[in-house]
Amino acid sequence: MKIYIDGEYFDKDEARISVYDHGLLYGDGVFEGIRLYNNRVFKLEAHLERLWNSAKAILLAIPLSLAQMSEAVLKTIEKSGLKDGYIRLIVTRGKGDLGINPMTCPKPTVIIIVDKISLYPEENYQKGIKIITASTRRISADALDPKIKSLNYLNNVLAKLEAIHAGCLEAIMLNHEGHVAECTGDNIFHIKNGILYTPDPSCGALQGITRQAVLEAAEKIGMKSEVTRITPYDLYTADECFLTGTAAEIMPVVSIDGRSIGNGQPGGITADIQEAFLKLIG
Ligand code: PXG
């Protein structure tokens, strides 16, 4: 594996940034997680567009053009020697003075990590996972828009800890109104009477790229989908449920807060969607 930092390439143990980087001091920055499948970067354009939009929203000027960033990503992959893996693209506010003021940071730091990721044990892709609803709420969209994929993950970290302490791998996060937003690192879908449902971004969901790919795949196989407000009740009484994310891919959910989903086994439509997704990633 190789790591790009501001135009230079380092081995894992040699890759370092300043302790005065506001990405570390204040979580001031944005990132993307991208998959490399069989030498192809999955949805690179969509990830770069989201990264640029996240940066624009926090008034952070990425010091590379889109073409330069794509080139840097491809070169880091080449140097890593990996054909399948995970790319973490990070742009922080950069090195500055102590104090929140981002204007003391003249140059954003650009980091590209190419490595492997395995979020969940392989066996769970067949047998599904049990999840809980966390008491930690998603930061409301009027405080920090969930469309911004920022380095501030503390409330997701707290929800993840709740999941781990409950013996689960993932947790559902509700928004301040009690509607389902998403999980700590994935979007959530459920199926009821043949219709696919997922929360609207205004409920606190990230506009996930895997989520979008699933919505498009569903349309292709003639399945009706609704992007709407969802309550815990809707999930408890769903026929099927699954999670989507770059790291998670498509993960069936078989139990939520002790309630079996459907018959307690991964659902047939979820399997169809897993298959459609596999075709998509080639
Ligand atoms: N919601 C949140 C809060 C996320 O962080 C998703 C949804 C899924 O979005 P995509 O675009 O990936 O379909 C994410 C993405 C990690 C890791 O290291 C987390 C994500 C992606 C890659 C790695 O845990 N989360």
Image: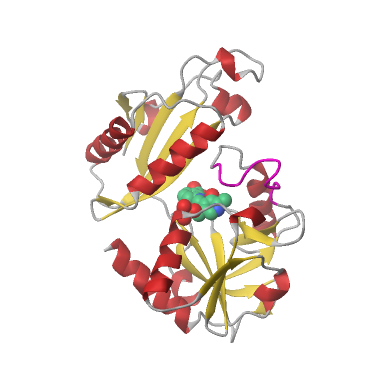
Is residue 185 at all visible to an observer of this figure?
no
The picture places residue 260, in percent across and down from the top left corner, at: 64, 80
Relative to 30, is 130 on the left or the right? right
Residue 78 occupies quadrant: top left
For the residue pair 129 and 133, the one nearer the viewer reads as 133
The picture places residue 162, in percent across and down from the top left corner, at: 70, 56
Looking at the rendered structure, the number of numbered marks drawn on it comes to 0
Relative to 107, is 191 on the left or the right? right
Is residue 266 at all visible to an observer of this figure?
yes
Quadrant assignment for the N terminus: top left
**In this view, 151 is above or below 228:** above
Residue 207 lies in the magenta stretch:
no
Relative to 184, is 18 on the left or the right? left
Residue at 43% over, 73% down: 218
For the residue pair 254 and 217, the one nearer the viewer reads as 217
How is the protein colored in the picture? secondary structure
Looking at the rendering, the stretch of residues picked out in magenta corresponds to: 138-148
Residue 50 occupies quadrant: top left
The picture places residue 257, in percent across and down from the top left corner, at: 70, 71
Residue at 64% over, 15% down: 98
Residue at 67% over, 47% down: 141
**In this view, 105 is above or below 9:** above
**In this view, 40 is above or below 123:** above
Secondary structure that dominates the magenta span: loop
Quadrant assignment for the C terminus: bottom left
Residue at 52% over, 83% down: 194
The picture places residue 92, in percent across and down from the top left corner, at: 50, 28
For the residue pair 62 and 250, the one nearer the viewer reads as 62
Relative to 224, is 174 on the left or the right? right
